[in-house]
Amino acid sequence: MIATDSLSGKPIAGAIVSGESEKEAIFLLESMKSWLSPDIKLATIDFSPRLESGLKKVFPGAMLQRCVFHAVQLLTRGLNKELSRVKKQELVDYIDEWKTLRKLTFLLERGGTMSQPFAFKFPQVRLARKVHEQLVRCLSGRDHVEVEKRLNSFLSSDLFLKWSGRKAFLTRHDAMFTKRKLKYSEKGLKYIVPRIHEAFRFAIREARVNLEHLKSDFNKAKYLIMKNPVNMTSQDRKNLRKYLKAFPWLRNYRKILVKFYYQFRLPSSKRGSLSFLEGLINVDSHPWLKSAVKTLIDNEENVFRFQVVSELFPHAKPSKSIKVVNESCNKQVNKLFRTQCGMRTIRNARMRISRLLGCPIIVSPSILNNYK
């Protein structure tokens, strides 16, 4: 755990602890009392309830500022989970149903039956299944004249014409008679029937491959949907417009997220409530997103406390660290840990981290007890 000065951004003190529990937070904060001459007036923390509880006990008069970086991270992580859920619901499950239908075609063509009927969720897959069942009926029997008659009648039926895969199917179907010169006869049925079944599987494969391409594009779109507009390039905007045309149901997520980013650029007098974030969730939304929206709305005042810091503390200079917890210290410590082979002793770890950050480092009693 590392505490930094909100104005200078430099580390004040740190502690080697066993975890971010309330007990460990109080241990660090109590020790800081002896190093800081005045009491802390403003503290920037993340959304940890244990750290907040420890801060209120040790520095009850300190004003709380929620870290803006962690506020954005909280929402984007929840939105990432939600978009992954939507991808599975709209694309992955769709692809899996086409694969299941393909396996089912082999079973039905061999005269088998399913132990339990499989209920397909997507209309196009249900329609394709009906088409295949009808094809199996048309191709059953050994009378080539009757088979040809039933099949030609089915190819002009409303059921077949509604099927989105009919063009791909007919491409393979017609090629049998134009390129391969096959003809309906008692002997010709041995070659025609399996090729018609193959033509059907070719058509549903085309549908599945198109969805696979959409799934790949969705992964790229998800990254751009959550990106801050300030950090977007012209190429990013161009790609985002393309993806929103492909996935129009993502527009609502993007619209609300842009509005959320915009709140951090407005003065407190013009900023509205974060209640608009509720437009991101519904009954089926991922629990992480529901929790993130609720947490941000409940902590709205503390998230945007930085907008009134200059009014409350006229002597304080504007500083980015008032809005964002300095994560660079943690990165430096992690890098030191990797290069020093884990810093095998507590004494060695304490000395090296203290020298790296230029601040005192203390060790939690729980660590010392475990070390003994």
Image (cartoon, rainbow, N blue to C red):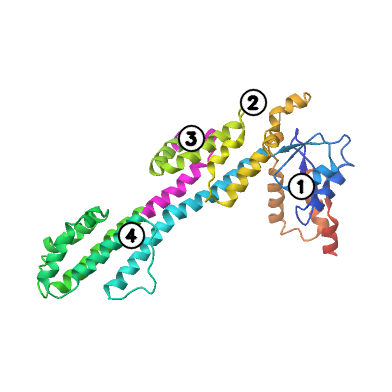
Which mark is nearer the camera, 2 or 3? 2
Q: Which of 265 and 141 is in front in this view?
A: 141
65 vs 283, left or right, is right
For label 1, the SS is helix
Disc with the residue nearer the chain's start (4 vs 2): 4
In contact (CB < 8 Å): disc 1 and disc 3:
no
Disc with the residue nearer the chain's start (1 vs 3): 1
Disc 3 marks which amino acid? Answer: Thr
For label 2, the SS is loop
C-alpha separation, residue under disc 2 versus residue under disc 1: 28 Å
Q: In which quarter of the image is residue 338?
A: bottom right
In the rendered structure, find residue 126 and report the number of the disc placed on it: 4
The residue at 73%/47% (across/down) is 49
- Image location of residue 26, percent across then percent down: 83, 48
Disc 2 marks which amino acid? Answer: Pro
Q: Quadrant of residue 72?
A: top right
In contact (CB < 8 Å): disc 2 and disc 1:
no
C-alpha separation, residue under disc 2 versus residue under disc 3: 25 Å
Q: Which residue range is magenta in the image?
A: 211-235
Disc 4 marks which amino acid? Answer: Arg
- Image location of residue 155, percent across then percent down: 18, 59
In the rendered structure, find residue 297 and report the number of the disc placed on it: none
Residue carrying label 3: 233
